[in-house]
């Protein structure tokens, strides 16, 4: 089955689901162009999930995906972690922004079962998951509601596990990709396989359509992905640069100024390994050497990142970007989509 048939789309181009940086406008723009717009629901409470899906459905009658992070089992709760050292490490950043270090909440994240129930109730065309394999119960419930499921992998072993779970398509995410390294069978440091090496090996290992992610920003990347056997591409940084994304102007400017060697892998901002552009906050946390486990660190830095976002201060935000940032030169989502579509096989 082709990716078009598997996901009900016209063009096999998928928008990367930006946790915290997704926007209704960008998702609608990609879906209306015939691709699959994707919205990241990381950290959303059930009511907000329902509201978001309804807003997406009002913005486009074309298929779209929503994305959730599955629990890996190593997440900490406020009662399990001592945030004292990590709080001291980020205190100078709070001071520079003139805001206090906050008191930890009762919980860092909504319950995944509650999030999934909200998605199943609203029945978007596609549910994409990262950081794990969907359960048999989730797959069955999605099937009953006509929801397709895609899962993201970083190794061949993960791809085999994902296919065995019954997903409709697999996103093979190379180490070049922006944002979090969503490995779930091993530490992400042990799964830094580049897209060019990963995609053909995953294609050879599974029978479901494979979507190449990481290192794709223009028609050349699309053509290369299909030459490797991919059935589609997932693109993040090139769309993140556009005016339709929820990225700040400072974030867009950082992407525009990036080179091939600008981005780095770090745990500083969330406690999990991620690819982004170094800035004042990342360097200060890494220098202090005190990083809380996920999701405690993500909550902690999120408090000053939110303030920085309001002020447009890029030095205190998470500037997620992939290694193709220098190729992300277009400011409008329609222009990005047209460029990508030009690389699709005839």
Image: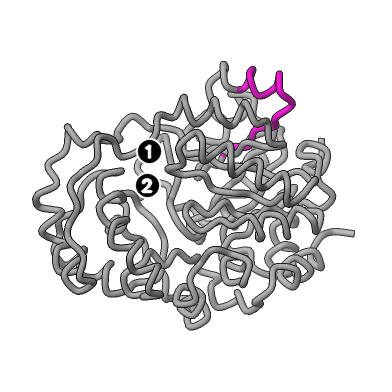
Is residue 229 at all visible to an observer of this figure?
Answer: no
Q: Residue at x 62, y 26 (%)?
A: 121
Locate residue 5 relative to residue 47 in the image: left or right: right
Q: Magenta segment range?
A: 139-151
Q: Quadrant of the C terminus?
A: bottom right
Tell me residue 35's x, y (percent).
Answer: 76, 53
Q: Residue at x 63, y 67 (%)?
A: 244
In the displayed structure, would residue 241 be above or below residue 207? Answer: below
Which of these two is toward me, 43 or 232? 43
Tell me residue 1's x, y (percent).
Answer: 82, 35
Q: Which mark is residue 186?
A: 1
In the displayed structure, would residue 148 be above or below residue 179? Answer: above
Is residue 273 at all visible to an observer of this figure?
Answer: yes
Q: Residue at x 69, y 57 (%)?
A: 225
Q: Which residue is mark 2?
A: 190
Magenta-span inclusion, residue 73: no
Locate residue 178 relative to residue 12 in the image: left or right: left
The reply to whether discs 1 and 2 touch (Cβ–Cβ < 8 Å) is: yes
Total marks placed: 2
């Amino acid at each position: 089955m082709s990716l078009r048939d598997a996901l009900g789309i016209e063009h096999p181009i998928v928008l990367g689901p930006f946790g915290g940086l997704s926007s209704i406008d960008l998702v609608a723009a990609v879906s209306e162009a015939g691709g699959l717009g994707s919205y990241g629901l990381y950290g959303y409470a059930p009511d907000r999930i329902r509201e978001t899906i309804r807003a997406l459905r009002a913005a486009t009658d074309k298929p779209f995906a929503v994305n959730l992070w599955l629990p890996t089992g190593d997440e900490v709760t406020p009662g399990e972690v001592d945030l004292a050292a990590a709080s001291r490490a980020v205190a100078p950043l709070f001071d520079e922004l003139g805001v206090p270090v906050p008191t930890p909440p009762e919980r860092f994240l909504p319950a995944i079962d509650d999030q999934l129930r909200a998605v199943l109730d609203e029945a978007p065309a596609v549910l994409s998951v990262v950081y794990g394999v969907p359960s048999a119960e989730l797959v069955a419930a999605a099937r009953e509601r006509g929801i397709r499921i895609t899962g993201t992998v970083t190794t061949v072993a993960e791809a085999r596990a994902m296919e065995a779970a019954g997903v409709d398509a697999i996103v093979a995410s190379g180490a070049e990709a922006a944002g979090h390294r969503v490995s779930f069978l091993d530490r992400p440091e042990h799964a830094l396989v580049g897209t060019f090496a990963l995609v053909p090996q995953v294609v050879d290992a599974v029978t479901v359509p494979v979507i190449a992610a990481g290192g794709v920003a223009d028609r050349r990347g699309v053509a290369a992905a299909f030459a490797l056997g991919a059935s589609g591409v997932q693109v993040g940084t090139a769309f993140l640069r556009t005016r339709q994304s929820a990225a700040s102007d400072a974030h867009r400017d950082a992407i525009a100024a990036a080179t091939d060697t600008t981005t780095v892998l770090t745990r500083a901002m969330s406690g999990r390994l991620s690819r982004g552009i170094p800035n004042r906050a990342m360097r200060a946390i890494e220098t202090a050497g005190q990083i809380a486990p996920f999701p405690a660190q993500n909550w902690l830095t999120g408090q000053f990142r939110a303030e920085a976002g309001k002020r447009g201060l890029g030095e205190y935000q998470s500037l997620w970007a992939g290694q193709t940032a220098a190729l992300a030169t277009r400011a409008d989502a329609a222009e990005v989509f047209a460029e990508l579509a030009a690389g699709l096989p005839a």
